[in-house]
Structure formats: C-alpha cells, structure tokens
Image (cartoon, grey):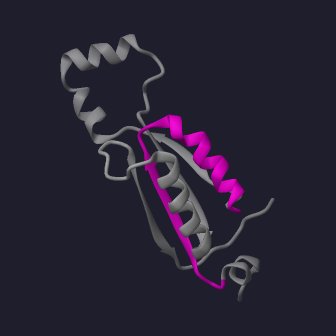
Amino acid sequence: MKNAWDERSGGTLELIVLVIKQAKFLDEILTGFVDIGIRGATVVGGRGMGQVLSSDVPIFASLKDMLPGLEFDTHMVFSVADREQVEKAMALVKEVCGDCDEDGIGVLFTLPVGRFMPIKG
C-alpha cells in the first residue's frame, strides 16, 4: 500500500547521512535543507574516532576536562528525501562547505529506503 510519501517521491526515497566536524556550517545547511523542501532532519552529536582515541593520552584527556562543552566534535544529520532533493542537498553541502577534498570537514552519503511510514500522534 502506497502512502503520500510514495506518491510525492515517485517511490524512490533515500536516507541522507551527513557527518560534519565543523559545526559552523550546520545552521546554513539545515536552513538550506528547508529551502529545498527537506522539512525534517535529526541532528545527533557524536565523537570522532580521533577524539575517542585521544582521550587515552593523558595530556589530551586533562585538556578536555578543562574545556567544558567540547564533548561532541561531530554532528550527524539524518533525513529522508526523494532523489531530486538528494541532488539539491549534495549541491548545497558542497556550496556551503567549499572544497569537498579538504580533510576533516565531513562526509555525506545516501542509502536507499526500502519502506517509509510517518508516525503521527
């Protein structure tokens, strides 16, 4: 049985996964998502592998304790979008973040969504 999302997307939805280390880009990306029709996204704070491993080095661990609020060095954005929105989202992220070849900014990839069901309360 098809739902409204299936009708709007032509039945092809993708999960956008954006992992970004530089939080300064986050607001502009999320605002841009709204502008291209992506109305919902989940943002989760995380820690990169380098941050986790550096906590084992005493000097870095003690610096972390002195700088509160630096628990998360990475933000992950998850959103379901149709193919057209995905193309626009990828162009937007490239425009906002600049050179995608620069190390350390992040990564964006998509996964096919087999089924989708909005849950309304």
Q: Quadrant of residue 65?
A: top left
Give the residue at x 58% y 81%: 12
Q: Which residue appears at 27% of the width and 19% of the height?
A: 61
Q: Residue furthest bottom?
A: 1
Is residue 20 magenta-colored? yes
Tell me where residue 11 appears, x and y as whole percent: 63, 84
Q: Is residue 38 left or right of residue 106?
A: right
- In the displayed orientation, state which residue is furthest to the left: 57
**Would you place residue 34 above or below residue 80 in this image?**
above
Give the magenta-colored segment's residue range: 10-37
14 left or right of 55 in image: right
User: 39 or 72: which is nearer to us?
Assistant: 39
**Residue at x-position 64% and y-position 55%:** 33
Quadrant in which residue 74 is drawn:
top left
Reply above or below: 94 against 12.
Answer: above
Q: Quadrant of the C terminus?
A: bottom right
Image vertical order of residue 57 relative to residue 83, above or below: above
